[in-house]
Amino acid sequence: MIRHCCRVSWTLLRRMALAWVLCILVGCDSTDPTPGPPQAIITPTQAGQLAVWRAWNVDEGAVASVAFSPDGQILATGGFENVVKLWRVADSTLLRTFTGATQPTNLFYLFAVFIPEMLRTFTGATQPTNCVAFSPDGQLLAAGGLEPGVRLWRVSDGTLLHVLTTHDKNEYIMSLAFAPNGQTLASFRPSAKIDLWNVPAGTLRGSLPATTQPLVDSLLSFAFAPDGRTIATGMLLDEAWIWNLTDSTPTQTLPHQAGKVNYVIFTPDGQTLITGSVDNTVRLWRVRDGSLLQTLTDQRRGIEGLAVAPNGQLLAAAAAEGVVLWQLPDGKRVQLLTGPPAVGTSSVAFSPDGRLLAAGGGDGTVQLWGVR
C-alpha cells in the first residue's frame, strides 16, 4: 500500500513538473496577453465603435505633431521639449529620440544649432516641434519648429543628415511635407515662401512665393496634392489658394472663409481640398473648379489639425473638445472622441492602413483609437 502511494505521488510530481516546464516553454502566464492592434478599417459606420487601444505619455508639454511611418509600425511625435521621438505602435516602446544636439560638422551648424541647443539645456528653455513627416519610403524623418531650418534624420540609426536652412533670421518652420516621389521636401516659413529642398543633396531647389500679396498677406499652411504637381496654401487674409507647382502660378482662389486659414489638406483622390479656419469652420472645396461643397460648423472650439482616412471616408479634426469625426463626402458629423487628454487634442493622424487613429494631447499624451 505504501509502495503504491509512493508510485502515485511520484507520478503526480512528474506530471506537475512537466506541466511547469511546458508553461515556461510556451510562455504560459496568468495575465491576459496584450491584445493585437485593431483589425477593422475605420469607416463612418464603425465610428461609434472606436475605443482607445493604447495610450501613453510621450512629452512633458503638448504633443504638437504626430505622424505614422509608411508601413504603420512606427509613430513619430514632436512636442514642446524640442525633441522628436519614435514609438513602436504595437507596444508603445520608445525606439529612438532625435535631437539637434549631435557633433557639429561645420561652423554654421556650431553657431546656428549646437550652441543654441546647449544654452536651452542649461537655461531650461524649450521650443516646440511643430511638424514631423516621414519620407514616402520611410527611411528619412523631417522635423521643423522654432529652430533654424529643417532637420533631416536617417531613421535606421538616428544620424542627422542635414539641417536645411536659408539663413533667414525668421526661419521657424510651421509646416513641412515630402513630395510623393520623396525627392523633394517642402517647408514653409512666415516670410510667405515655400522652400523646396533637394532631399538627397540637402540643398535648396527653389522657393515659391505662395501669396499674391506678400506685403499684406502671409502663408499659414500648405499641403501637397497626391499627384505631386499641385499644392494648396492657407492664407492670413481669409483665403486659400491652389497652385501649379510647375510654373508657380495660382490656379484657384477659394475666398470668403471668415478667418485666417490655418489648415489645408487634400483628400486621397486629390479631388477635394479641405480647409480649417480660425472661426472653427471646416470647408470642403472641389479642386477642379473651386466650388464650395460643404461647410462644417458643428464643433464648438478651435481646430488644431486635420487628417483624412486613407479610404477617404472620414475626416478627423483635433479640437479643444476632443477629436471630431465627419463622414465624407457629405460632411455628416458621426462621432466625438473624448477623454484623456484633459487639455484638448493638438494633432491627429490616420495609420496608412486606416485601422488606427492617433491623437496627440495637450497634456503630452498620445492615444491610438481603433475598432474593437
Image: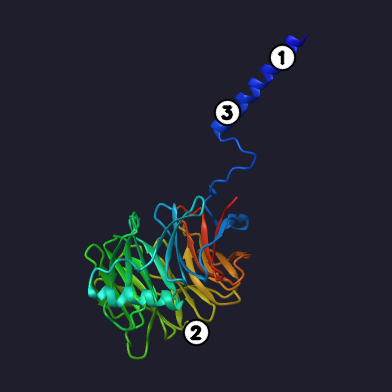
Kindly indicate the quadrant of the structure image that contains residue 331.
bottom right
Q: Earlier in the sequence, mark 1 or mark 3?
A: 1
Residue ID at (60%, 24%): 18
Q: Position of residue 16 (x, y in %)?
A: 65, 25
| Residue carrying label 2 | 258
Identify the secondary structure beneath mark 1: helix
Q: Are the residues flagged by discs 1 and 2 in contact, CB closer than 8 Å? A: no
| Res. 334 visible in picture | yes
| Res. 173 visible in picture | no
> In front of the other: label 1 or label 3?
1
The amino acid type of the residue labelled 2 equals: Ala
Say above or below: 69 vs 1: below
Q: Earlier in the sequence, mark 2 or mark 3?
A: 3
Q: Earlier in the sequence, mark 1 or mark 2?
A: 1
Say above or below: 73 vs 10: below
Q: Where is residue 32 in the image (x, y as percent from the top left)?
A: 63, 42
Identify the secondary structure beneath mark 2: loop
Kindly indicate the quadrant of the structure image that contains residue 286.
bottom left
| Residue carrying label 1 | 6
Of residue 276 and residue 332, the one placed in the foreground of this image is 276
| Residue carrying label 3 | 22
The amino acid type of the residue labelled 3 equals: Leu
The colour scheme of the drawn protein is rainbow
